[in-house]
Image: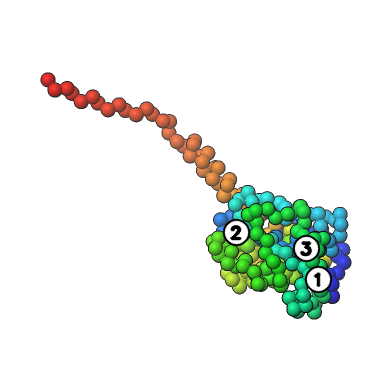
Amino acid sequence: MPIPDIEPYPLPTEHELPPARVGWRLEAARSALLIHDMQQYFVDFLPAGSELRDGLIRRVAELREAAAAAGVPVYFTAQPGGMTRGERGLLHDFWGPGMKHTGAHKRILPELRPEPPAVVLTKWRYSAFARSPLAELLAGQGRDQLIICGVYAHVGILMTACDAFTRDIQPFVVADAIADFSAADHAAALDYLARRCALPVMTHEVVSRLALPARQDLELLAAGRRRRPPRTPPVPLATPPTAS
């Protein structure tokens, strides 16, 4: 079964988030951003000109900018396209042959084009961790929190978050920066994530948290300047007496 035609639906608001079971606190020094499958092939199933599509792209771009400003590593996932039946495995049974090996299908949206030092990971299965070095890269950078945005909520995003959880990496799924086949699928994914393995959050919360260390540094610097006593000239050394 191919991806269905998707009807527009409103992205969730903060008041529609399911109750959180954990009190995880996002920290820029511990986190990385994963932009999940924002390739032309997948995003083109979202209705053109809809707030579902445009709002998703806008918020993902906002998250990427916030991450870059905070020095947070950014990762993209992208399917290679044109996979053989053997490479595709059981994905073929559920979704058919998938995307073609063409730029029109494979490319990450121009609005989100990866720029160094962002890393693009080849996506082989639902989870971004499957057959990829993502876990090793996160460990090497001392990151144990993963901010996840992109498509689709109840498929790859859900599985990636569960996989992160099994590796003791805290997944933060950005509820208004992901999209799905329907509002019902979107809500069901968030409900499962909140109850079992992740913390759903909003874009503005993530942006605020990632900016916090920089704001704190500036505030501490300003406070230090205010508290610093006025500089006094050094006391001259006494001139030793001359021998008589």
Residue 201 position within the rendered picture, expressed as x and y whole percent measured from the top left: 68, 59
Q: Earlier in the sequence, mark 2 or mark 1?
A: 2
Question: Residue 190: which quarter of the image?
Answer: bottom right
Label 2 to label 1, Cα distance in Å?
31 Å
Q: Which label sits on residue 144? A: none
Q: Can you identify the residue that label 2 sits on? A: 31
Q: Earlier in the sequence, mark 3 or mark 2?
A: 2
- Number of residues whose C-alpha sits closer than 10 Å to that of mark 3, classed few (under 14), some (14–19) or many (20 or more): many
Q: Can you identify the residue that label 3 sits on? A: 106
Left or right for 243, reference 238: left
Say what amino acid the circle numbered 2 marks. Answer: Ser
Name the residue rendered at 69%, 71% in the picture.
127
- Number of residues whose C-alpha sits closer than 10 Å to that of mark 1, classed few (under 14), some (14–19) or many (20 or more): some
Residue 181 position within the rendered picture, expressed as x and y whole percent measured from the top left: 82, 67
Q: Quadrant of the C terminus?
A: top left
Q: Nearer the viewer, mark 3 or mark 2?
A: 3
> Is 33 rendered above or below residue 136?
above
Name the residue rendered at 63%, 49% in the picture.
69
Say what amino acid the circle numbered 3 marks. Answer: Lys
Q: Earlier in the sequence, mark 1 or mark 3?
A: 1
Left or right for 128, reference 102: left
Q: Nearer the viewer, mark 2 or mark 1?
A: 1
Label 1: which secondary element: loop
**Residue farthest to the left, as pictured:** 244
Name the residue rendered at 54%, 63% in the picture.
140
Label 3 to label 2, Cα distance in Å?
27 Å
Question: Residue 178: which quarter of the image?
Answer: bottom right
Q: Can you identify the residue that label 1 sits on? A: 98
**Residue farthest to the top, as pictured:** 244
Label 1 to label 3, Cα distance in Å?
11 Å
Residue 167 position within the rendered picture, expressed as x and y whole percent measured from the top left: 59, 71
